[in-house]
Every structure is written in structure tokens, then in C-alpha cells.
Amino acid sequence: MKLKLFFYIFLIAFTLFPIQNVLANSEPILISKSLYMEDVIFDGKWTNLEWKHSSHNQINYEEYNVSIHLRTAHQGDYIYIFIDPVDDLTLDEFNDEATVCFDAKNEKQETFDENDFCFSVLLGSDTGNIFQGTSIDDSKSIMKKIDNIENFIAISSVSDQDDRYSKTPHPSYEFKIPIKLFERSDNYGFYLSVYDASLEKFYSWPHNATRENSQIPSPSSWGDIISPDKSLPEMNLPIMILVILIVSVIAIQSKAKLTKFH
């Protein structure tokens, strides 16, 4: 009875509580299901507690003494993303920029295809842009701007006293991305870049996916964004194996104790 109770508590906690991940290189970005994303006020900054119930991924660039806080979540038909480059203390309106990209099939191809999408917004803008992979010929492709779709939101502003990670004003970015652009999956290819206009520098994730001349790097260099719960749409296999192993160890230990006292 106690073992079953522990198992159910573990699964509930695993599903509902925010996941935190500190990224030094290219470990997968984690995205969790949230029941609170409808509370987000899309004003381009952290307002009150709206992003508290989301996965936290801290991306560190130690050589530059820079960190970017990335919050991710999904609810219903949308993916929600908050990007917080707390060390960019120069506010270059309509020049600083954040971009996130998804490879719907995570094919890691050298060229872009119709399954690749990027979303970007400039500091101070309340209108973002969507780009989709388009083949020019067998060896060349581009990310082509397409019309924004219904309910897509990308907005940026200057942070204020409500920001969780720094009270010093800096750019921040919010996205609401309709999942209908992709096939539902628990593992997408993922790319992030933040542009600091004052330094004329892109900070990219993964770190080796360097962005040069404003060109998005090949999907072959993108990392992964995974959903370790069951809702986008399935539990990731390695996480499932981990849960099974933990429960199995507890069951074996409990059985050993019972055997000892008989």
C-alpha cells in the first residue's frame, strides 16, 4: 500500500511541478505542461507570478560572464516561451532581438525544410515574425518569412521590478506559439538566439550553433527540446525508464525488508 502511494505521489509531482535545468553546453531544453499559462499577461516582461509554473532552463556563457534565463511551458494548443537575458544592460530598442526555432520532426538536416520554423521579435515590438524553411534546390534552402497565424504572440519590453532574476532593467521577450504549426511530439529540434545590439553579438543555444551575419544556422546543429511528461504527447522514453528503475529499486528493497522479518 505504501509503495503504491509513493508511486502515485512521485508521478503527480513529476507531472505538475516545474522542472529546472542548468545548461552549460547542449543538454536538452526541458518543457513541462502547465495549467497556468492562461494567466500570462503578454506585455513583454515578467509580470507578477505568471511564469512561475513553467520549466526553468538557465543557459550560461561563462567566457562572457553572461546568463540567459529561459522559461518554457505548454498548455492546450500552445507553447509558451519567456526569454530573459539579464546581463544585457543596454536597451537597444528595435535592435535587440530574440529568436526561437523548432524542427517539428527533429531531422537534424543540413538544409531547411517545411518542418522548420523560427519566431523572432525585436525589443520594444509587439509584433513578431514567423519564418518557415523553404527549399530553393536540392542543396540550398532559406528561412522565408510567412504570414503570422491566428493567436501567435511575440512581444518584447524592458523588464521591471517584477522580474524574478534581476531588478536591473534589461530586455525580455514573450512568445505564444500555436502547436498546430507542428505535429505534436515530445521531442523537437530547438534553437535559440539572443542578439545584443550594443555588442553586435549573438548568444546562441546550442553554444556551437554560432549565428553569423544574421543567418540561422543549419538544423543539423540545433539541440533538442523534450517534454518529460505525457502531454506533448508522450512521456520521453529515457525518463520513463528512470521512473521504472526507481520504483523497481524501492520494491526490491521493501521486499528484502519483509523477507528479513519473516
Image (cartoon, helix red, strand yellow):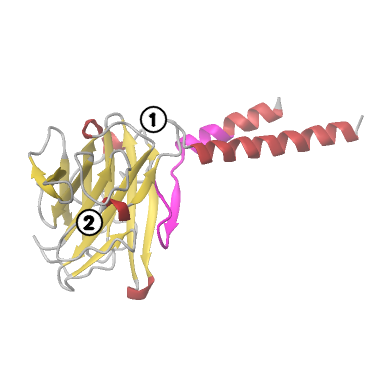
| Vertical comparison of 230 with 94: above or below | above
Mark 1 Cα-neighbour bin, 10 Å: few <14, some 14–19, many ≥20: some
Residue 63 location, x and y as percent?
36, 75
Q: Which quadrant, please, contains the C terminus?
A: top right
Closest to the observer, 262 or 115: 115
- Residue 172: assigned label: 2
Camera sees residue 197: yes
Closest to the observer, 35 or 161: 35
Camera sees residue 128: no
**What secondary structure is marked by label 2?**
strand
Position of residue 88 in the picture relative to residue 208 (left or right): left
Inspect the image, locate mark 2, and give the three-letter code of the amino acid beneath it.
Ser
Magenta range is 10-30
Please report the residue visible at 66 percent of the width from the left and 27 percent of the height from the top: 4
Q: Are marks 2 and 1 in contact (CB under 8 Å)?
A: no
> Hey, which quadrant is residue 96 in on the image?
bottom left
